[in-house]
Image (cartoon, rainbow, N blue to C red):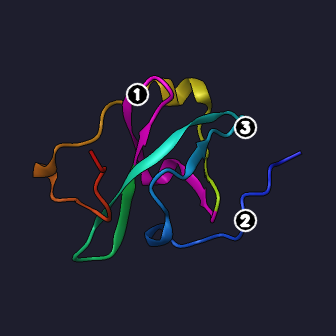
Amino acid sequence: MQADDGYAVHYTELKQGTPVRSSDGQEVGAVTEVLDNHREHIFDGLVVETASGELKFVDAPEVERTAERAVTLNITAAEVERLGPPPSRGRGVGGLFRRRR
């Protein structure tokens, strides 16, 4: 049984702290930042903080669904563990919100 994650929302509506679930149903972290090419309004991906505090970059094609109460990926929890860190700011992507310190 799939958890109710609410209505589908545009990536720009995601909130910081939104839970992120893998394709195998495991909660793998929370959204800390949404990256986009703001000039062209193209979704680039998500920065996800894992339970251990690691920051992982989830590329846009790996995001299956963005919803009110959760993001669902099309990769497994094991695949999320192998993801690398977020890109440096020099790549030309912008964040829709910044991580609060």
Could you tell which of marks 2 and 3 lies nearer the N-terminus? Answer: 2
Looking at the image, residue 18 lies above or below residue 14: above
Q: Amino acid at mark 2?
A: Gly
- Residue 63 in percent (x, y) is at 53, 52
Q: Which residues are magenta?
A: 47-68
Which quadrant: the N terminus? top right
State the residue position of label 2: 6
Which residue shows up at 72% across the image and 65% down it?
6
Separation of residues labelled 2 and 1 (CA atoms) = 26 Å
Looking at this view, is 49 or 1 the one in front?
49
Left-right relation of 7 to 4? left
Q: Nearer the viewer, mark 2 or mark 3?
A: 2
- Residue 95 in percent (x, y) is at 27, 60
Q: Amino acid at mark 1?
A: Gly
Assess whether residue 100 is covered by the magenta stretch.
Answer: no
Which residue shows up at 26% across the image and 44% down it?
101
Looking at the image, residue 23 lies above or below residue 77: below
Looking at the image, residue 4 lies above or below residue 37: above
Cβ–Cβ below 8 Å for labels 2 and 3? no
Q: What kind of element bears circle 2?
A: loop
